[in-house]
Amino acid sequence: MQRVSPTRMNLLIRKRQMKIARQGADLLRKKRDALMKEFQKMLKPIVQAHRELDRTAREAVSFLALALGKDGPEAVRSAALSSAGRLRVYREEEKVWGVRIPNLRAENVVRKSNERGYTLLSVSARIELAASAYERLMAKIFELVPLEARMKKIGQEIRKTSRRVNTLEQRVIPQLQAEMRFIRQVLEDREREDKFRLKRLKAKKEKKF
């Protein structure tokens, strides 16, 4: 414990600091609890999103392998080059207990057949199925990435908030309590000494008379 001057003013200061520290710890605990609930709510959707992503990926790879085997790499490559286009992705943010949570939103990921840049007469049904499957896969990825980014950000904030709570509860508040006990003890000792001196002075005066 740092050396603290045992005065009534310092005792009042420590009392105010204690009040602020306890209020801060209480608010941080509420924030941590709210973030924990948000974190737990996300577990099921993320597990489900991973399962759907895996299923869609297997389906897309299966369709692509069939197209490559039946139509050949050149036909698949030609269709891919024809259907290449711009993907619009928007980054957004929301706040959860003051924490900025990133979010991604993509437009026109899954397109109609006539929006892919080639005619249905120029490609086989197998290539069309592969293109559709990979677009669905991209859509699933854009669904999962924001969820994982959100979970990561909330997890980091939970750890940071827990560290602050622990610092207040295990270091700041105990130190303030120790300093207050020290100041009170010194002030009480001084008060007893003053009373004792006053008694002695009073006794000496009474002897003289």
Image (cartoon, helix red, strand yellow):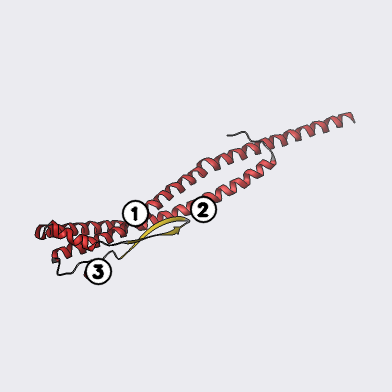
Residue 150 percent location from the top left of the image: 38, 55
Please, is residue 53 above or below residue 201 in the view? below
Please, is residue 126 above or below residue 7 in the view? below
Residue 122 percent location from the top left of the image: 15, 67
- Is 13 on the left-hand or right-hand side of 61? right
Look at the numbered disc 2 and give the secondary structure of its residue: helix
Circles 3 and 2: CB atoms closer than 8 Å: no
- Is 16 on the left-hand or right-hand side of 112? right
- Residue at the image point whose x is 71% and y is 35% from the top: 190
- Which sits in the foreground, 14 or 114? 114
Disc 2 designates what residue?
Answer: 27
Please, is residue 153 above or below residue 92 in the view? above
Look at the numbered disc 1 and give the secondary structure of its residue: helix
Location of residue 182 (image quadrant)? top right
Please, is residue 165 above or below residue 107 in the view? above
Residue 44 percent location from the top left of the image: 31, 58
Q: Quadrant of the C terminus?
A: top right
Disc 3 designates what residue?
Answer: 115
- Which sits in the foreground, 57 or 107? 107
